[in-house]
Image (spheres, rainbow, N blue to C red):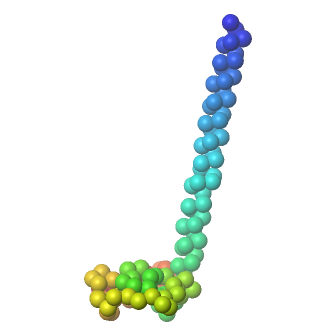
Amino acid sequence: MLEKKKKAQMTAVLVILLIIAIGIFIFIYLLTPKVYKNNEKEKDNFCSNDLECVPASCCHATLCSTIKNKQDCSGIFCTASCEPGTLDCGQGSCKCINNKCKAVIE
């Protein structure tokens, strides 16, 4: 009887340790890369003046990025419409604000 109780306790301890190990795995391999990627994006978006900032997409851009990350828009055709809330038709421009490229839409 006592031996069965010890086996049950050992099983419970092993299950708890397994749950803890899975939790650590999830934290390290699933959550940490997102933080790293966000930091990399921040580094990639660093600027020191407005000339380093360009629209982040080829058509109807609403965001800006550095010229280093400029998309290749060759062969891409956009509509000629001036979409509201975008950088289209001089409605806004890309600026370096606090060392980050940002869209300033008027």
Residue 73: give x, y in percent of width and height: 48, 88
Relative to 50, residue 40 above or below: above
Along the horizontal axis of the image, is 2 left or right of 98?
right
Residue 84: quadrant of the picture: bottom left
Residue at the top extreme, as displayed: 1
Residue drawn 59% across the image and 50% down it: 27
Along the horizontal axis of the image, is 76 left or right of 35?
left
Residue 9: give x, y in percent of width and height: 66, 20
Along the horizontal axis of the image, is 64 left or right of 105?
right
Residue 49: give x, y in percent of width and height: 50, 90
Residue drawn 66% across the image and 24% down it: 11
Q: How many numbered marks have been drawn onto this rendered protein structure?
A: 0
Residue 93: give x, y in percent of width and height: 38, 89
Residue at the right extreme, as displayed: 3
- In-front residue for pair 50/84: 84
Residue 97 visible here: no
Relative to 105, residue 37 above or below: above
Relative to 59, residue 41 above or below: above
Relative to 48, residue 33 above or below: above
Residue 38: quadrant of the picture: bottom right
Q: Which quadrant would the N terminus be assigned to in this image?
A: top right
- In-front residue for pair 96/61: 61
Residue 28 visible here: yes
Residue drawn 50% across the image and 91% down it: 74
Residue drawn 57% across the image and 55% down it: 31
